């Protein structure tokens, strides 16, 4: 009720998901700590390639659990956080740091057309021509991009094969968009969801990227996202996370 977000973000289920992340994180703070630390360290290593006089863009910055905002604010002339919604905590911190702005934006540029019945996935165009941007990072966002739009299309009665094509298109177009920035890029994302049985054996790996192949990662680690009891008493889920320094268009 109190988190500012536009109507589409509310209707598409994205706002509920945004709030659900923070409850899940409260329950599993200790399990998520290593992943959040790895993400922050990876971002700080990656920005060494970037001109600090410009603007750093952080896509999917959300609740800032995995964003080293103070360090980025000290390093860059300006930092722009981009997400569909921001908590008041994030807004207050951004105001206090003075050179940080919160930009509410749908990075897929697809939510509005999909919500009004289109099944064509647009190519995102925002920001790529802005020469003030000297660093761009997509942070634990890519696997989330197809989730709510997929549910939206299912509710509209769209055929499963078309939903799948749209979801894959959202992943591909995000990567193509990142590859067009004329500055160092960083993509941190889930590459696989591993389902573990009660003996902690991997019994299934789910592809959250709908078949899109990623470039070779510079680093990878495990995010213990749903320990036993979160989704099921006898099963746990963990994410395989990768960090990619130079994003290329998927083939
Ligand atoms: C798994 S969270 C990433 C973790 C986040 N960095 C944090 O610390 O909370 C994914 C974030 O992506 C945002 N997101 C999902 N779809 C988006 C879209 N189409 N455009 C912009 N942000 C989006 C969500 O609102 C959420 O904050």
Image (cartoon, grey):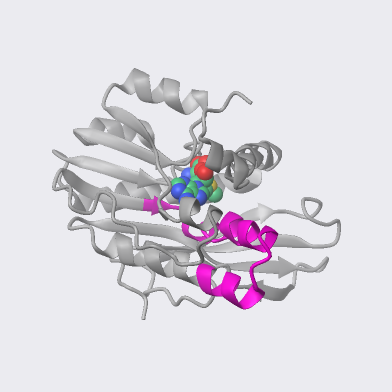
Q: At x 81% / y 69%, what residue is drawn?
A: 199
Q: At x 29% / y 50%, what residue is drawn?
A: 126
Q: State which region is magenta.
A: 138-166
Q: Is residue 157 magenta?
A: yes
Where is the N terminus found, in terms of image quarters? top right
Please identify the dominant SS of the magenta region. helix
81 left or right of 222 in image = left
Q: At x 31% / y 29%, what residue is drawn?
A: 100
96 left or right of 115 in image = left
Residue 235 at what x, y percent from top left? Answer: 80, 62
Q: Residue furthest right?
A: 233
Question: Which of these two is toward me, 38 or 80?
Answer: 80
Instruction: Examine the image and state in which quarter residue 236 appears.
Output: bottom right
Q: Is residue 196 above or below residue 111?
A: below
Question: Which of these two is toward me, 167 or 70?
Answer: 167
111 left or right of 57 in image = right
Question: Which of these two is toward me, 217 or 168?
Answer: 168
Q: Is residue 241 visible?
A: yes
Q: Is residue 215 magenta?
A: no
């Amino acid at each position: 009720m109190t988190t500012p977000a536009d109507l589409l973000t509310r209707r598409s289920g994205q706002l509920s998901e945004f709030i659900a992340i923070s409850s899940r994180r409260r329950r599993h703070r200790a399990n998520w700590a290593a992943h959040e630390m790895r993400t922050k360290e990876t971002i700080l290593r990656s920005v060494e390639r970037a001109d600090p006089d410009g603007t750093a863009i952080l896509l999917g910055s959300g609740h800032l659990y995995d964003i080293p905002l103070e360090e980025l604010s000290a390093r860059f002339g300006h930092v722009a956080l981009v997400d569909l919604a921001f908590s008041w905590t994030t807004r207050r911190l951004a105001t206090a740091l003075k050179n940080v702005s919160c930009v509410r934006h749908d990075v897929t540029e697809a939510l509005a057309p999909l919500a009004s019945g289109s099944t064509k996935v647009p190519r995102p165009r925002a920001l790529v021509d802005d020469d003030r941007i000297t660093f761009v990072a997509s942070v634990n966002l890519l696997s989330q991009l197809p989730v709510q739009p997929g549910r939206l299309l299912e509710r509209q009665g769209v055929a499963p094969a078309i939903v799948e094509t749209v979801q894959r298109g959202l992943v591909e177009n995000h990567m193509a968009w990142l590859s067009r920035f004329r500055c160092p890029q960083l993509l941190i994302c889930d590459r696989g969801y591993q389902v573990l049985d009660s003996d902690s054996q991997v019994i299934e790996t789910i592809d959250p990227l709908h078949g899109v192949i990623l470039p070779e990662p510079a680093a990878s680690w495990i995010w213990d996202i749903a320990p036993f009891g979160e989704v099921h008493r006898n099963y746990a889920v963990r994410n395989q996370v990768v960090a990619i320094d130079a994003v290329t268009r998927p083939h």
